Image (cartoon, coloured by chain):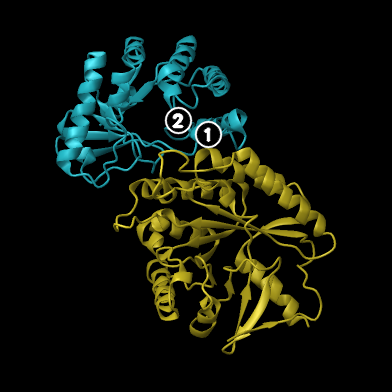
Chain colours: A yellow, B cyan
Amino acid sequence: MWTEIQLQKPGRWPQGIRLPIVISVHHQSEEAAVVFPDGQVDPFDYSERQYGGRRGAWRLLEILEKHGVLGTWIICGATVEKYPEISREVKKLGYSIAGHTYEHEMMCNYPPDHELRLIRKTVSVFEDKLGDHLKGWRTCFASHHTVDLLLEHFDFEWDASIWNDDLPYIIEGYGKKLLEIPFSSYSDAACAIQITNPMPPTPYGTWHSNTPEFILRTMKSQFDALYERGAERAVLMPLTVHDFIVGRPSRSLILDQFIAYAKQFDGAVFATHDEVTAWWLENYKAQ
Amino acid sequence: MEYGGRRGMWNILEVLDACGVKATFFVCGATAEKYPDVVRAAHADGHEIAGMSYAFERVRTASPARERGIVTRTAKALEDTCGSRIRGWRCPDYRLSPQTLDILSEFDFTWDSSLLNDDLPCLFKCAGGTIVELPFTTSTADKTYIGYPYPMRGGPDGLANVWDCEFDVLYRESERAPRFLILSIQTWATGRPAPLRTLRRFIERLRKHNDVQFARCGEIVAWCSKGN
């Protein structure tokens, strides 16, 4: 069990920061590929997603490096094992790293003991393969037990699995504290996602994707709204991109152009989840 | 769909011809039998004809015998239509069976284009020889914007935006590493007048770059094979 710690005064970011933008790069490659009822992984969806590990993730890293901005890499345990070079590279370059389950298991489908085993397995992959002790976690489809398990059995500093607020909040349980950093469907490049219908009734309409132009416009609208709001109160812009979606050439331009746009505004800063955690906890320590 | 065979393919041929571009057509065996004239015309114009099943059969769980039957029947239908053997293949639903590439190699195919997992071709050692895989992408697919059931997500202009972005990024990257842009269009979708204009404008835009070359899949495969 856990409770939320209410801040006595509204939280603030450090001086000079008006809008932190927290990029999450989902590096999960083929882990979430559709499985048919006969048990075979869909070869089409697998191939589509495998692009992420083989090419897309590198393209996204190149864009972040070109602009000199950091963010957080959200990585599945199995993806670390299959594509260790890029995980090592982002760790070396100073990005925050979060675990994203072992093989993109939908945690809401599992009982707590199985979820716990999967979190443990993922944590140990990062220890063994990267020498990284995970500070952050983003689950796939949180269960009702997710946050409880993270607090009771691990020493994560932050979790970014829940979609229920604009700003981070501190929770406490089992004698530990954890910062929940919410994200939102607005910020997910899921509006660019290619939905592969595993059992198409017809050969058509198996994927749907908005244009790069539309997605970029949506990102800018969200940025503009938050930047305006940031003049009066603390705001946060989570931005999620997937290696197999925005890592495709045409979609990568969205990230490239969004970063270039946001960088023009004073006080808009690209931050990692580790930084956001440190900044927000200052609000608690100060009171 | 019928629009593609009756009209769309002729329309696309006209644009390609006007722009002096040779392309690869993935044709079902049954389509060639129903619309032999247009397939023959494409072949005679110097476009490449490749196979894409006989009648859209899915082979993911097919027995090797059944899959061999589909490949040979398709190859024969296309050879009877055009007078020459086909060398390339794409699975109609992009779902290879575990034996697809081996079967293709047994029947002297040299390339396949059904995977989506890379920016560059790769080579597979198969039972009957080497198969070059040319990965393609659905991220620039016309169907998403103009196809089925209605134009949406920006329609022909949205499609233009996706293609432009794809080219811009790959062209920039090609300064540092080899790249190729593979664009898949459907005769029943891009063959309609509005998206046809999108296609024509896109080709005209690409043609302004003197270091961009149009190629049929078979030519890319020949370049890959030469390098190895």
Is disc 2 placed on a helix, strand or loop? Answer: loop
Q: Amino acid at mark 1?
A: Glu
How packed mark 2 is, by other alpha carbons closer than 10 Å (few <14, some 14-19, many 20 or more), is some
Q: Chain of mark 2?
A: B
Q: Amino acid at mark 2?
A: Leu
Q: Identify the residue at image location x=31%, y=12%.
A: B40
Q: Is residue A263 visible?
A: no
Foreground residue, A196 or A267?
A196
Image position, residue A240 (x, y; %): 58, 55
Q: Which mark is residue B181?
A: 2
Q: Which mark is residue B166?
A: 1
Tell me: B36 left or right of B166.
Answer: left
Q: Confirm or deny contact between disc 1 and disc 2 (CB under 8 A).
A: yes
Query: Vertically, is A190 above or below A112?
Result: above
Question: Residue B9 location, x and y as percent?
Answer: 43, 18
Determine the residue positioned at 30% across, 31% down.
B55
Q: Position of residue B123 (x, y in %)?
A: 27, 37
Q: Residues within 10 Å of mark 1 (few under 14, many from 20)?
A: many
For residue A143, above or below residue B220? below
Residue B99 lies in quadrant: top left
